[in-house]
Amino acid sequence: MLRLPGVPALRRHVDRWAASPRALDVVAALSAFGLMVLDVPGLAREDNSLSGVTATLVLAAGAATLVLRRRAPWVPYLVALGLMGWLHEVTMIQFALYSLGRFRGRRAAIGATALYIAVAYALFQTPGWPARHGDTLSDFLSLVVPIGVLSAGVGIAAYRQDLVRALEAQARAAAARQAVQEERIQVGRDVHDLVGRELTVLAVRAEVLAVRSRGGAHQRDFEELAETARRAHLMLNETLVRRADREGATPGLEGLAELAAESGRLGGPVALRVAEEAKALSPLRQTAVHRVVKECLTNAAKHAPGLPVRIAVDVAGPDLRIEVRNPLPKDPPDRAPVSTGTGLVSMEERVASMGGTFTAGVRGDAYVVEARLPSGLPPR
């Protein structure tokens, strides 16, 4: 037995269909037909071989082409020109010009309006069309031109409004994706800070127990536990950095030379020294080094432009040491317009999150930035 949909389900179905573009096209076609059908009595009286029924069918067929106004708006436009020439009907052209402006933009609408006016003028000059069309050409054009310009203008305005809404939707989507991405990055950093610290404590504790049980039955077990914790920490670092690299993060130690060269091109020569042992640092620590050095060079360019900068990256036992030094300028530039004062705070937070220390200040006749953090390298 056939079951009819319930009233709520039918209402939801109707609401979805009414909000669809196809429904709007059908409404436009019905509206055009409803306006044109008012002219059927007059069309039947004209010398066009049409009766009231046939005129209604012709107008219905012409209006039906408006359902194509999104995919093929030129079809109802050409039909409207035909109806204008045959039946002197100008209602259809209004819908057609609006559709061209709405779905094809300004150029198409302006071209179609110009062609419509030219065709109307040519028809005006045709003997017997229409039987009564005004006393002068200006009277005729005062009717034809406003119809075309107003219809096309409204369509163009709607087209631009559609573009604005689309751009706003894209901006909202991009902002949402950016917020999600930033949240993921923050979660990744939190995971690294929390889990990484626990893995480091586990590795150190296992090494201490291995030393205490040297010569005992469990020394080998503690050593393996410490090595496993170090490998897990290294994998965590590399996973986080590889993820960040795909999102456009900063490179590691291989990018320091490029930073130095760029600073040199700006007039501030840079002497860079990177210890060979530093090349074995984890990707996360290399990224930290790169960002600290980059921020220091930026600050040097702001506060000591043109003066030489010395950069040293060393590994001393369990510590990684970064030192950036530049002489103090004789006439310091104005700090307010070029600096927000947050660079040092950002560097200090990054170093502190990795269990390190950060100092920055004047030493003698130079400004020195020094960062120390665990190297994460196995003892030699």
Image (tube, helix red, strand yellow):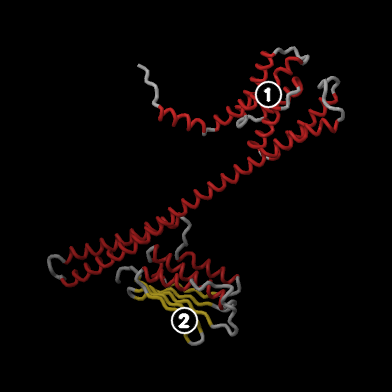
Query: What percent of the width, then of the height, locates residue 58?
Result: 67, 17
Residue at image point 30% right, 66% down: 197
Residue at image point 61% right, 29% down: 28
In the rendered view, does 59 fall on the left or right side of 196? right
Q: Is residue 66 above or below residue 376?
A: above
Q: Quadrant of residue 206?
A: bottom left
Compare residues 314 and 372 and report the one nearer the observer: 372
Picture disc at residue 9 = none
Query: What percent of the width, then of the height, locates residue 4?
Result: 39, 21
Badge nearest the viewer, 2 or 1? 1
Q: Quadrant of the C terminus?
A: bottom left
Mark 2 or 1 closer to N-term? Answer: 1
Q: Residues within 10 Å of mark 1 (few under 14, many from 20)?
A: many
Residue at disc 1, secondary structure: helix
Residue carrying label 2: 361
Query: What percent of the width, then of the height, locates residue 304?
Result: 56, 78
What's the amino acid at mark 2? Answer: Gly
Furthest-left residue in this view: 217
Query: What percent of the width, then of the height, locates residue 171?
Result: 53, 50
In the rendered view, does 365 fall on the left or right side of 187? right
Q: Quadrant of residue 377?
A: bottom left
Furthest-bottom residue in this view: 364
Residue at image point 50% right, 50% down: 174
Between the residue at mark 2 and the residue at mark 1, the CA separation in whole angstroms equals: 84 Å
What's the amino acid at mark 1? Answer: Met
Residue carrying label 1: 36
Residue at disc 2, secondary structure: strand
In the rendered view, does 183 fall on the left or right side of 45? left
Q: Quadrant of the N terminus?
A: top left
Q: Residues within 10 Å of mark 2 (few under 14, many from 20)?
A: few
